[in-house]
Image (cartoon, rainbow, N blue to C red):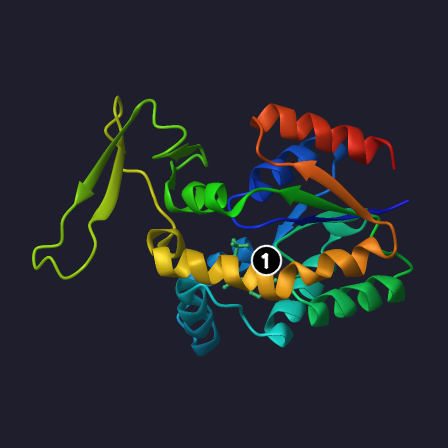
Amino acid sequence: MSLHVILMGVQGAGKGLQAKLIEEHFGIPQVSTGDLFRAMRTRSDDLARKVQDIMTSGKLVDDDTTNAIVVDRLAQPDAQNGVILDGYPRNRVQAAFLESHLAEKGAGVNAVLLLELDLYTAFKRAFGRVTDADGGSYNYYYNADGVNFTWIADDSDCFPPRLEATLSEAGSMLKRRPDDASADAIIQRIDTFLETTRPLISHFQSSGKVLKINADQSIDAVWSDIRSALESL
Ligand code: AMP
């Protein structure tokens, strides 16, 4: 039997990290639409440029483009026993599309893991996060050990200071997602989550598929709750 799991939650809820753990444990790949769009950065065609501009603003990419990229990914050999969908579907159109696409393949959504987190914490997790080249994650507010964080003032004082981070020992510069560096883009993403993604919860709740997880815990504790929830399916 295939296992199709949707990971839902506001930005900063830890979807990406938990998806990796599910992937390792259950042997189904993580499909993150955000990662698929970010991978388009190396391209310079019109579509790739349009997608990058939308992402930087914190708005959503159009449904046709998003659904097409997901269909393409679900057709890959490693996705035949199921996937963990991270960041998709994000609205009703995408949810309806996904359900009918899976139904055509004789599959369906098995569970929706809802990572619950208050929005103030969500904001700090996104605004403060930086990553190293190996995917290691640090945070200005929550996990700053071993990192030198510096606010760099704008020369003209017209713009807010920029946050720079380097690993204290290695001295290497850490990366901050462009859409995390803008408070306005984060607020836009939280608003989009509240307005268009959160209504999906009731849609999936009506079919009894939503498993609620408290995301305001350590990574290990969240993972343990997720594992038990999925194993009880
Ligand atoms: P994420 O990494 O999931 O936070 O996604 C980063 C950005 O990619 C979002 O702010 C959107 O601009 C775009 N994106 C990711 N997934 C979707 C989706 N399912 N529908 C539309 N846009 C998306």
**On the picture, is 140 further left or further right than 61?**
left
Disc 1: CA contacts within 10 A as few (<14), some (14-19) or many (>=20): many
Q: How many marks?
A: 1
Q: Position of residue 176 (x, y in %)?
A: 35, 46
User: Residue at the location (65% across, 42% down)?
Assistant: 115
Q: Position of residue 101 (x, y in %)?
A: 81, 67
Residue positioned 80% across, 35% down in the render? 230
User: Residue furthest toward the left?
Assistant: 155
Above or below, comparing residue 168 to residue 187 in the picture: above
Question: Does 212 sit left or right of 162 as displayed?
Answer: right
For the residue pair 206 and 17, the one nearer the viewer reads as: 206
Residue at image coords 74%, 36%: 27
Q: For the N terminus, which image quadrant?
A: top right
Q: Is residue 162 above or below residue 191?
A: above
> Where in the image, quadrant-wise, is ligand 1 located?
bottom right
Q: Is mark 1 within 8 Å of ligand 1?
A: yes
The image shows residue 19, relative to residue 110, as above or below, that is above
Q: Residue 181: x and y, percent?
A: 33, 52
Residue 29: x, y in percent?
A: 69, 44
For mark 1, give the secondary structure.
helix
Q: What amino acid is labelled 1 in the image? A: Thr
- Per the image, the residue denoted by label 1 is 33
